[in-house]
Each structure stands twice: as structure tokens, then as C-alpha cells.
Image: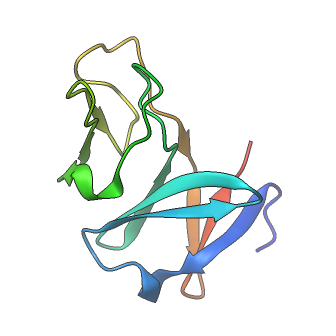
Amino acid sequence: MDQPGFKKSLALSNLPDNQSVETEIENMALLLHRRGDQVFATGVYCPHAEVRLDPRNCDGDLIICKAHGYRSNIKTGVCLNEPDLKLNNFPTVIEDGVVWVKMF
């Protein structure tokens, strides 16, 4: 990977389609969400109350916080309950079967 800021995550084959997993890159926990040939990377905390999100609580493109039911779009980060809140999103690239995440 020649693009600055991108860090190697995991092999795409280790992330089944329509699944989400928690991973760690450089001591930072992230959630990776595979949707077909795309992978979206988000933070692990709900933008509403900093509750840790469970990757098993995804419903389509939404991740639902177990504490208060807040729903955030994994592709855009937009919180449907409060549009002013945003789930952290990180750009991703898939190269040679490996998911790379741009860390800020």
C-alpha cells in the first residue's frame, strides 16, 4: 500500500459478507463491516453516550447501541436518532485481498 496513513488490517477472506467484527490497529479498537466488495471501518463507541458498540448489533447498514437504541449508519456515520451526532468513520481500501484502514 503506497498511500500515506493507511495501516494493514486483516485479510478480506477473514471477514464474511454482511458481517461485522472488532479489530485493533496500532492499539486502537475499530469495527470493520463488510458489505459485498466494500468494507467500512467505524469507531467502537456510540456517538451518543460513548457506550461500546457490539458488532453483532448490526442490522443491514445500521449499528444499534445496546444502551439507548441509538442507530448509526456504518457507511456515513450519521446517527438516525440525532443527526448532529456522528459515528467515527475511517476510509478503507482493499488491495490484494487485504483491508487497509486510514488512521487519522
Q: How many numbered circles are shown? A: 0
* Coloring scheme used: rainbow
User: Residue 65: x and y, percent?
Assistant: 28, 35
Instruction: Name the residue at 52% across, 35% down.
Output: 88
- In this view, the residue in front, 80 or 57, is 57
User: Residue 95: x and y, percent?
Assistant: 60, 79
Which image quadrant for residue 98? bottom right
> Compared with residue 59, is residue 70 higher up or lower down, i.e. above or below?
above
Instruction: Name the residue at 36% across, 73% down.
Output: 37
User: Residue 49: x and y, percent?
Assistant: 42, 20
Instruction: Name the residue at 32% across, 15% down.
Output: 83
User: Quarter of the image containing the N terminus?
Assistant: bottom right
Does residue 10 appear to the left or right of 83 in the view shown?
Answer: right
Furthest toward the left, the residue is 59
> Compared with residue 78, is residue 85 higher up or lower down, i.e. above or below?
above
- In this view, the residue in front, 64 or 10, is 64
> Compared with residue 12, is residue 103 higher up or lower down, i.e. above or below?
above
Does residue 69 appear to the left or right of 98 in the view shown?
Answer: left
User: Quarter of the image containing the C terminus?
Assistant: top right
User: Residue 43: x and y, percent?
Assistant: 52, 43
Instruction: Name the residue at 27% across, 29% down.
Output: 67
